[in-house]
Image (cartoon, helix red, strand yellow):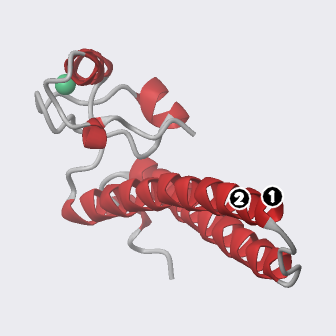
């Protein structure tokens, strides 16, 4: 039966894993919903230049939004990977534990608050790719 319950190393991690998996599912669902909406809007063939540029604009928003979702999905899958490796909840920069409060708000957080702020400042100064800026949703 449940003989392993006592030896389970980090029950908290299991909770985050569930939250992360649920969030990934949500993002995937919202992405496919957007795709479906996009296909429907394509059925209205643009009749003149004005409609055409409107269509391009919507496409741009769609792609842009999708890349934000893709980024979030990647961060979530990285976090799940860290759970599997037993490295979850540790700052990738200074290797200090990330506070529970922060993980509760942002389960895919890669850095502690201090490091994240330092990184944000470096991005703002143009010293770093904003690849390292976290998705805040
Ligand atoms: Zn740190």
Residue in front for this viewpoint, 7 or 108: 108
Q: Residue at x 55, y 64 (%)?
A: 24
Q: Does residue 98 appear to the left or right of 64 in the view shown?
A: left
> Ligand 1: does it lie within 8 Å of the C-beta at label 2?
no
| Circle 1: element type | helix
The tally of labels here is 2
Q: In terms of image quadrants, where is residue 90?
A: top left
Q: Quadrant of the C terminus?
A: top right
Structural distance between the alpha carbons of marks 2 and 1:
5 Å
Q: Is residue 80 above or below residue 15?
A: below
Q: Is residue 117 rendered to the left or right of residue 96?
A: right
Residue at image point 13% right, 24% down? 127
**Label 2 close to label 1 by CB (< 8 Å):** yes
**Residue 50, disc:** 1
Report the image quarter containing ligand 1.
top left
Say which element carries label 2: helix
**Picture coordinates of residue 62 (x, y %)?**
64, 60
Q: Residue furthest front?
A: 49
**Vertically, is 93 above or below 65?**
above
Q: Based on the displayed image, in which of its 4 quarters is residue 38 positioned?
A: bottom right
Identify which residue, 25 or 56, lies in the foreground. 56
Above-or-below relation of 71 to 137: below
Q: Which residue bears the numbered disc 2?
A: 53
Q: Position of residue 8 (x, y in %)?
A: 35, 61
Residue 59, position as x, y percentages in the image: 64, 63
Residue depicted at x 83% and y 69%: 48
Q: Is residue 18 left or right of residue 94?
A: right
């Amino acid at each position: 039966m449940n003989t392993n319950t006592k030896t389970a190393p980090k029950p908290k991690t299991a909770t985050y894993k569930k939250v992360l998996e649920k969030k990934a599912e949500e993002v995937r669902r919202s992405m496919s919903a957007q795709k479906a909406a996009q296909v429907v809007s394509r059925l209205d063939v643009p009749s003149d230049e004005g409609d055409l540029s409107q269509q391009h604009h919507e496409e741009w928003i769609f792609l842009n939004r999708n890349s934000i979702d893709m980024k979030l999905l990647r961060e979530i899958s990285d976090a799940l990977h860290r759970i599997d490796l037993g490295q979850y909840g540790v700052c990738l920069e200074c290797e200090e534990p990330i506070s529970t409060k922060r993980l509760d708000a942002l389960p895919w957080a890669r850095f502690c608050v201090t490091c994240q702020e330092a990184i944000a400042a470096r991005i703002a100064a143009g010293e770093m790719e904003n690849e390292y800026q976290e998705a805040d949703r």
